[in-house]
Amino acid sequence: MAGTAIPSTQVAIPKPCISVASRTPSSSVAAFFGNEVKDITCAKIRSLSFISTTESFSKSFNRHFLRSERKVIKAVSGASDKQPLPGLPIDLRGKRAFIAGIADDNGYGWAIAKSLAAAGAEILVGTWVPALNIFETSLRRGKFDESRVLPDGSLMEITKVYPLDAVYDCPEDVPEDVKTNKRYAGSSNWTVKEVAESVKQDFGTIDILVHSLANGPEVSKPLLETSRYGYLAAISASSYSFVSLLKYFIPIMNPGGSTISLTYIASERIIPGYGGGMSSAKAALESDTKVLAFEAGRKHNIRVNTISAGPLRSRAAKAIGFIDMMIVYSLENAPLQKELTAEEVGNAAAFLASPLASAITGAVVYVDNGLNAMGVGVDSPVFRDLDIPKANKI
């Protein structure tokens, strides 16, 4: 039986209707036309499978089939709903995002916030308590205004900034020396549980949760020289903090929501110099992403993904001491010979948070110019005689 493709039409021609249980012809079958389901007998389908030579196909088609309609979805970026965008834009209007881990305008967390805001989402921020005052002051005095500019020319608005230290789940976990630390003076309700409760009290619910947190106090030490304290501190701040955020924020997340964290290729490949247990922390984060995707998906209809981002010259990345070398290495060896921008990671996060990625969960999404795919460093002298395109110098 041959089928003919008709523009703007979906025609389903089933095979002979055989019941799996009885192995005998079934009296009816469900046929799908566009988005509708119609009950139709096998005899009827057989009669539709043959077209009389004296009857035009179009006449027969119009009699028996439903013609699908072409629907165009229009959305906007930013606050205005009067400027429709063509094509298939990311539309996060009416969504609220909480981004944990923004302390300046120089990292991936800030870039993700901008991309989410550009797509129409409302932005809430959780900032490490010791950095809170400087961040809020800089924001208030306009020091970040240039970095806040969105594609439509408006400025990204941060609805509220919350003090947050994701190393502590609840007030009972906070040691006395931290409570009395002057860097925490004047701030309250900054443990993960308290922040989630504050967000619930202020806004009710959120739709997007972003984990942009990492810290390894001994990151500059080789793993063999890392202390138990340094190793566990890296795990606590960089991976378990994601588990904690989901634990306390999922109850206030709307079904269909999305969570995103940031990881690094050191989770699965050796990156000399990226020490202090940080490679282990990233590996744990990626493993947890898969488990959390199952648990959060089944119980709460929440998606959980992580972005494996390439090297960025951010203030936080400078702590490892050789970020410039990693950027040069990526430029020389990645399939795409360009320096990665924070905006590219932010846009990938906006996609993952949007309905366009509604079937993506438990994934490690690489945004690194393809460096993760390489098995060797092609800038090595070993490959000098091969005809390999060299990197474009920046």
Image: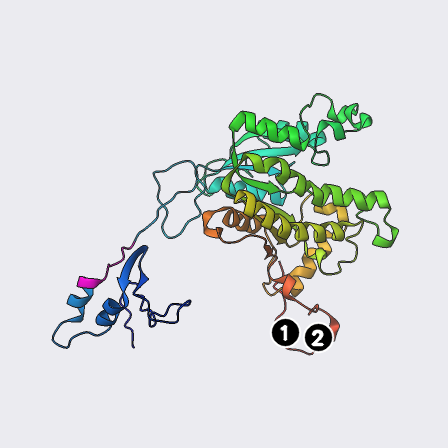
Looking at the rendered structure, the kind of residue marked 1 is: Ile
Kindly state the secondary structure of the residue where label 2 is placed.
helix
Residue that appears at 60% across and 32% down: 143
Task: Reply yes or no: does residue 120 show up in magenta.
Answer: no
Which residue does the numbered mark 1 point to in the structure image? Answer: 388
Q: Mark 1 Cα within 10 Å, few/some/many (few <14, many 20+)?
A: few
Task: Reply yes or no: does residue 64 show up in magenta.
Answer: yes
Please say if the residues under marks 2 and 1 sit with CB atoms less than 8 Å apart.
yes
Query: In which quadrant is the N terminus drawn?
Result: bottom left
Kindly state the secondary structure of the residue where label 1 is placed.
loop
Q: Which residues are magenta?
A: 63-70
Residue that appears at 49% across and 39% down: 117
Looking at the rendered structure, the kind of residue marked 2 is: Phe
- Whole-percent x, y for residue 261 in the image: 62, 46
Residue that appears at 61% across and 45% down: 108
- Whole-percent x, y for residue 84 in the image: 35, 44
Let me know if residue 216 appears in the view: no
Residue that appears at 67% across and 45% down: 314
Q: Main secondary structure of the magenta part?
A: loop
Let me know if residue 232 appears in the view: yes
The image quarter containing residue 247 is top right
Q: Nearer the viewer, residue 98 or 287?
A: 287
Marks 2 and 1, how far apart at CA: 8 Å
Which residue does the numbered mark 2 point to in the structure image? Answer: 383
